[in-house]
Image: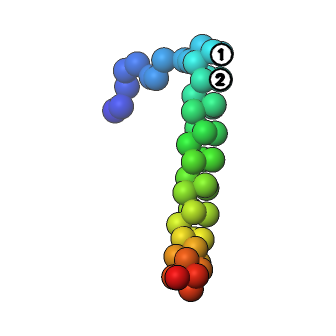
Amino acid sequence: MFGGMGMPQLSPEELRAAEAEASYTVHQVLATAVALYLSPFAVDTIWKMF
C-alpha cells in the first residue's frame, strides 16, 4: 500500500551533523526554559532594587 522507495540512508558524516544539530537544539530549548522560569524572579528583584 505504501510501497516505493524508503528514506535514503544517511552517510556517517550526515548522521553526526544531524546528531550535533539535535543536541544543540535540545541545549537551546533547555537554556530558554530555564531563562523563562527565572525571568519573573529577576524582574521582581530588579523592581525591589529601584
Residue type indicated by callout 1: Pro
Closer to the camera in the image, 20 or 28: 28
Residue at (52% x, 82% y) in the render: 50
As drawn, the label of residue 25 is none
Vertically, is 5 above or below 34?
A: above
Left or right of residue 28: residue 4: left
Task: Decide: is 48 above or below 16.
Answer: below
Task: Please tell me whether mark 2 sits on a helix, a strand or a loop.
Answer: helix
Q: Report the residue at 63% width, 31% height from top.
A: 20
Residue sitting at the far bottom:
48
Q: Residues within 10 Å of mark 2 (few under 14, many from 20)?
A: few
- Which residue does the numbered mark 2 point to in the structure image? 16
Residue 40 visible somewhere in the drawing = no
Residue 12 shows which numbered tag? 1
The secondary structure type at the circle numbered 1 is helix
**Quadrant of the image containing the N terminus:** top left
Measure the C-alpha gap from mark 1 to mark 2.
6 Å
11 or 6, which is in the foreground?
Answer: 11
Quarter of the image for residue 14 reads top right
| Above or below for 32 versus 23 | below
- What residue is drawn where x is 48% and y is 17%? 8
Can you give x and y, in whole percent of width and height, for residue 6 in the image? Answer: 45, 22
Q: Is residue 6 left or right of residue 46?
A: left
Count the marks. Answer: 2
Give the crowd class for mark 1: few <14, some 14-19, many >=20 residues within 10 Å.
few
Which is nearer the eye, 13 or 25? 25
Provide residue 38's location: percent of width, then percent of height: 60, 71
Three-letter amino acid code at disc 2? Arg
